[in-house]
Amino acid sequence: MSGYKVLIVEDEQPMRELIASFLIEEHYEVVQAANGVEALQLFRREQPDVMVVDIMMPFMDGFELLEEIRKRSDIPFIFLSARGEELDKVKGLRLGADDYMVKPFHSGELIARIETVIRRAGGKQSSQTITSGGLILDLDYMEAKSAGRLVTLTRKEFRLLELLIKHENHTVTRSRMMELIWGPDYPGSERTVDTHMKTLRMKLPEESERIKTVRGVGYRLEAPK
């Protein structure tokens, strides 16, 4: 889902920046606050689409922040906290939180939960799409169509196809794909890209001939003739 703005409220800067990096990689716009008081000010000014909030913070904790937000808005609100006690979860949900995640967390689960609460809230009125020939990608809902057919892709397959379409007729190197989609610290080899590209071609038989291997370099999506 691109085009959405997330307000992250977390007093520990390394954790706040880590969450931000996950969201930016998925094309979210990110606003950051170090405490609840700052978050209220940013909420008024930035008008985010969803909030991801820690509980234990100075000046105003996450529960107090949620109470203040609910006086003003029904914005999707997710707690992301090290406090995993059942009473905390129940309190957060009863105060009006849409979801509650416990640290440590997996980035993919956080993204999925953000997507879910945005959809539940109705999302935006229109979605952003990119096209190439018979390929249509809905970037907000991460849906792919080929020749009018809905294609089931994994998140990384979708991101690979998005990258190829955005760089149509230009070669994207394996190393660049690894960096953008798997991250710079991924321990696997570039053969991972080849495996995913093979699967992508199998899932897109109508367009597979346009996906060219540039030997020793990477891949290129040729424009339709």
Image: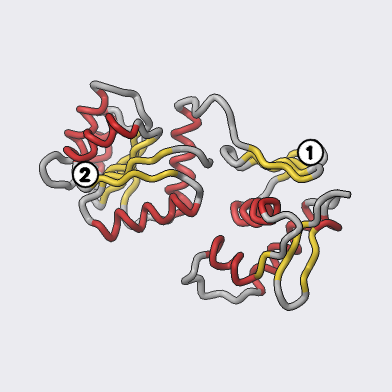
CA separation in Å, label 2 and label 1: 44 Å
Q: Which mark is residue 55?
A: 2
Q: What kind of element bears circle 1?
A: strand
Vertical placement of 73 versus 14: above or below? above
Reading the image, the residue beneath label 1 is 149
Residue 150 x %, y %? 74, 39
Q: How many residues crowd around disc 1 within 10 Å: few (fewer than 14), some, or many (20 or more)?
A: few
Report the residue at 16% width, 38% height from top: 37
Q: Pick out the residue farthest to the right.
A: 225
Residue 164 x %, y %? 69, 56
Vertical placement of 223 versus 212: above or below? above
- Name the colouring of the figure: secondary structure
| Closer to the camera in the image, 152 or 174 | 174
**Label 2 vs 1, first from the N-terminus:** 2
Task: Please state which amino acid type lies under the numbered disc 2.
Answer: Ile
Where residue 196 sits, quadrant-wise, is: bottom right
Q: Are marks 2 and 1 in contact (CB under 8 Å)?
A: no
